[in-house]
Image: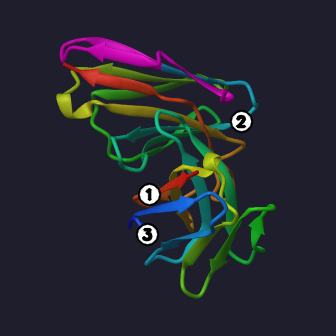
Amino acid sequence: QQPVQSPQAVILREGEDAVINCSSSKALYSVHWYRQKHGEAPVFLMILLKGGEQKGHEKISASFNEKKQQSSLYLTASQLSYSGTYFCGTGTYNQGGKLIFGQGTELSVKP
Amino acid sequence: DTEVTQTPKHLVMGMTNKKSLKCEQHMGHRAMYWYKQKAKKPPELMFVYSYEKLSINESVPSRFSPECPNSSLLNLHLHALQPEDSALYLCASSVYRGQDQPQHFGDGTRLSIL
């Protein structure tokens, strides 16, 4: 079952913050976050595991709510380079290596 | 530049042709993946190899035939494809096959079927 991402698209000005959500109807073991720029490969951002800590670095972080089977990606003080499509990929138990990706959130950061 | 290299970058083929896509990684990863991605859609898993053995086949039509000759190389053999098979084909690798492993993607091969 495909996870649901929201919003589908968001436009920001440089320096603004954004939150992208990913929800699943299945019990999740992991949530992966990727960013894909047009014509390029998806780039791994971070992974959150059941029972793990919130991940992230200075301006991009993520959380995983195990009770709700939801993950959120937080982008603070956005930069032009943050533009792209963000995908969450969910992993369930006993499906080693198989990720199901959400439909994507298109993020545009304007000057 | 990504550490997973895919060739060719673009491929145009007729429905009766046979061609192959190639993927190479030298990170020592033991799991490799093929995904199909249509425009403005997420990647969809096709195949997973673990230690050169096919672990997952997502009910992919037999006109797609994967091969993993060694731990660094993954091929996708194409034969008698249909126009709806036109898409970006992405290869990925991870240290091992597991839900806790980040997948590293190549830039993909953009395939067009005439």
Q: Chain under label 1?
A: A
Q: Position of residue B77 (x, y in %)?
A: 38, 21
Disc 2, SS: loop
Q: Which mark is residue A54?
A: none
Q: Can you tell which of label 2 and label 3 is closer to the viewer?
A: 3
* Mark nearer the N terminus (1 vs 3): 3
In the image, taking residue B36 as reference, residue A55 lies left or right, namely: right
At numbered mark 3, what does the secondary structure look like: helix, strand or loop? loop
Q: Which residue is mark 1?
A: A104
- Can you tell which mark lies on residue A7? 3
| Image-quadrant location for residue B73 | top right
Q: Mark 1 or mark 2, which is nearer to you?
A: 1
> Which quarter of the rendered picture does the N terminus of chain A lie within?
bottom left
Q: Classify residue A51 as left or right of residue B21.
A: right
Mark pair 1, 3: CA separation: 9 Å
Q: Mark 2 highlights which residue?
A: B29
At label 3, the amino acid type is: Pro
Q: Position of residue A85 (x, y in %)?
A: 49, 51
The vertical placement of B73 against A25, above or below, is above
Say what secondary structure mark 1 lies in.
loop
Q: Nearer the viewer, residue A4 or B28?
A: A4
Residue A98 visible: no
Query: What crowding class fits label 1: few (fewer than 14 Cα within 10 Å), some (14-19), or many (20 or more)?
Result: many
Q: CA distance from mark 2 to mark 3?
A: 34 Å
Is residue B89 something one can see in this rendering?
yes
Residue at 27 percent of width and 27 percent of height? B63
Magenta range is: B1-21
Q: Measure how far apart labels 1 and 2 are at the Cα level.
A: 27 Å
Please, is residue B54 above or below residue A18 in the view? Answer: above
Please tell me if label 2 and label 3 are on a single chain.
no
Three-letter residue code for mark 2: His
